[in-house]
Amino acid sequence: MVTRWQRLRAGFGRMVDATRPGTLAAYQGLVAKAGAEEARIEKLTDEELTAAAIALRDRAEGGWSDRDRVEWCGLGREAARRTVDMRPFDVQLLGTLAMLSGSVVQMATGEGKTLVGALVAAGYATQGHQVHVISVNDYLAQRDAEWMGPLYELLGVSVGWLSQHSTSEQRRAAYAADVTYVSVSEVGFDVLRDRMATDVADVIVPEPDVAVVDEVDSVLVDEATIPLVLAGAVAGDESDRAITKIVGSLRVEEHYEIDEEGRNVFLTEAGADVIEQALGGIDLYAAEAGSTLAQVNVSLHAHALLRRDVDYLVKDGKVALINSSRGRVASLQRWPDGLQAAVELKEQVKVSEGGEVLDQMTVQSLLRRYKTLCGMSGTAAQVVENLQEFYQLGVRTADPNVPCIREDEPDRVYATVPQKDEAIVDYIFDRHEEGRPVLVGTLDVAESERLAKRLARRGLSCVVLNARNDASEAAIVAEAGAYGAITVSTQMAGRGTDIRLGGTENSQEEHDRVAEVGGLVVIGTGRHSSSRLDDQLRGRAGRQGDPGSSVFFTSIEDEIVQHYAPETEPAQDGETDEYGQLTSKRAQADLRHAQKVAEAVQLEIHRNTWRYNQLAEQQRTILLRHRDKLLTSDAALTELKQRCPDRYAELEKTVSEETLIKAARLIALFHVDRCWVDHLAFLADIRETIHLQALAREDPLTEFHRLSIPAFKELVSEAWERSAKTFEAANITEAHGLDLADAGLKRPNTTWTYLVQDNPFGNEDDRTIRHVAALLRKRRNSKR
Ligand code: ADP
């Protein structure tokens, strides 16, 4: 029985402590009432059920009452039972209600978030909203929309989905539905393309209203600062090639040095000499050589710091980036142009076409546009602060439907990496002997392949899963629960990969056979840079009350320790057992400390990137408002008439007002867009050079503002001046309107979209690491 006090406490939980997730207790009363309605609703015919759902639409004005919410839970439950053969558990209804109030809900893997997402989306739609269900990839958008389609239909809600292969007609149709399933990158790219429209009829994406975000922590936190980019074709730069070639011949220590953390690389004097001579005796450090020096640095970064099979793969003659939090190929991502080209040259593959950035937007800005944001994930509780700070979102945790009995063992920490590796193989061997399915999560592709080889030497065969496409990945992972299966995979943050005991055979007998030997065992070969990623891996085992266990093998030589807690003492005599495992208590604390530094650094970087992006976003918003006016009214002609009265008088004689309005609009839009492209390039430039100023002890952000604000202020007047010039000279006739090519207003004929792995240079990060690490260490020492 929930007391009033408990309910009150749950309701105020967030106000009391904004760093802790709340519970779902506040909704228990409503769900209990929905339970009491079940017998009545069961008797409705399909038509009556749909009619009852539609009747709720009419009551949506001003928001639903508690009574309406109860009715929604009852109808949703019955509709799901009839259409997709799942009767939503009480916890699923609790989660639905919390999300309908704009919360983020944490539900463990296998608890049925797809169904919850559909009940939430249909609920918002029934309240008259247009809903986007934001998925992490195209595969899940399609799968979930199709899977839940019949449920939507019975509830009287239309649903659509789109993917990167959809035509613009298909996109329009999908966005016109009440609920649209779409990946975060696709909706972002559509928004970017819309912002270049020169005719209102070409705009595809409706005004943002409600977003239901799946895997909400990866999207809103891990990927928040990734810019989505719309680019147009321009020719590549030959000088990069020469520089890459020279840099490729440099040798570590003699010509350049890498810092201890492996994040920065510096030219030595000898290295600078080699380059200066090869480029015809220039002075690299002279002020006018700034851009050459920047190119050299980019090249050196690609050459010395980016690692094949860790940071990227070479596949089918192309460089494919690896997304570090998902451990899989990020097919739509690339580095900023110069770096991308440098890596391609280093690997001797064809240099992909560079582009001029026409517009860009971070994932965070994309999602902050929605009036209502809610979401779900298996691991949101650790990012409560972050979601609150950047999105004003609260988090509530759902209890599992069946209590989780998975055993999470403490880390096994080894003195050295080879000792750890050996222990992992031994452990897998033993579990495999028992018949338990084993899922090993590795940190990168190269490691997964090395482990597969070591297992083979011990006579164990395994399925290696990395960097494949999402659909086949889901099918392979689904088999990971089969008796005796060994699956080695890079981190699988994504969903759509439900691991049933017994594999896809789906017989109770097989399930029980695997459960009897202990269920799935999950092994991590090292701590990730965030404990959420660790938890996502653990969460693969023990779904819906199944037995299972998880354990991480780590070493104080692991990269995360070297990088984030380099002061960690190596193992002392007597601290380890005969296999090199540390028996002392400090080992686990050291590992956790390193991870905490990594997490804090990530948050700092997020804040920092956001500070820079915010200014550009504000400027973009102002400019878009201006652009929108040009697009939807005759404002362009009004302005140009005023600026060029004689020219207007002359044109007026032969050209109709309607044609002139259109021509003026095209001219003004072209110049505004052009000026924005130049402004973006300018912002990118100052951001790059600002680190140098930071060395001169100026606050880089202040400096960034100081330079960018006046430039922006001039943008609109500059665009008008250019427009007036074009208006004076352009060829405008009644028969053909404005001659674009003749007026020099050709837009790029091909555009494409991609995501950028932002901030690859780590300069800011490194300062942040040292700062954060020192703070945490101080706090830790004072507690001792
Ligand atoms: P999650 O995304 O939370 O890991 P999914 O949405 O993929 O989980 O669902 C996991 C599995 O649980 C699916 O096979 C789904 O059919 C099943 N499932 C979810 N909800 C229910 C339910 N109420 N009754 C029966 N099965 C369910």
Image (tube, rainbow, N blue to C red):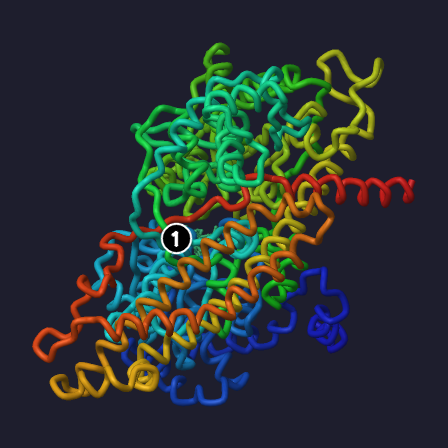
* Residue 349, horizontal then vertical, whole percent: 33, 27
- Residue 12, image x, y percentages: 72, 73
View quadrant of ligand 1: bottom left
Q: Is residue 381 visible?
A: no
Question: Assess mark 1: CB under 8 A from ligand 1?
Answer: no
Relative to 166, is 277 above or below? above
Q: Which of 703 and 333 lies nearest the eye of the viewer?
A: 703
**Residue 243, relative to residue 8: is it above or below?**
above
The answer to whether residue 693 shows anywhere in this view is: yes
**Which quadrant of the figure has residue 538?**
top right
Q: Tell me residue 228's x, y (percent).
A: 42, 54
Residue 482 lies in quadrant: top left
Query: Left of 769 or right of it: where is 654?
Result: left
Q: Residue at x 54, y 40 (%)?
A: 290
Residue ranking furthest to the left? 735
Badge 1 density bin: few <14, some 14–19, many ≥20, Cα 10 Å: many
Would residue 76 appear left or right of 221 to someone viewing this image?
Answer: left
- Residue drawn where x is 14% and y is 75% of the image: 737
From the image, which quarter does the C terminus lie in?
Answer: top right
In this view of the protein, which residue sits in the foreground, 389 or 111?
389
User: Along the line of sight, which residue is nearer the eye, 57 or 40?
Assistant: 57
In front of the other: 749 or 439: 749
Q: Position of residue 491 (x, y in %)?
A: 51, 37
Q: Amino acid at mark 1?
A: Val
Q: Please, what secondary structure does the residue beneath circle 1 have?
A: strand
In the rendered image, the quadrant that contains the N terminus is bottom right
Q: Which residue is mark 1?
A: 357
Count numbered badges in the picture.
Answer: 1
Residue at the spot 90% in from the left edge and 44% down from the top edge: 783
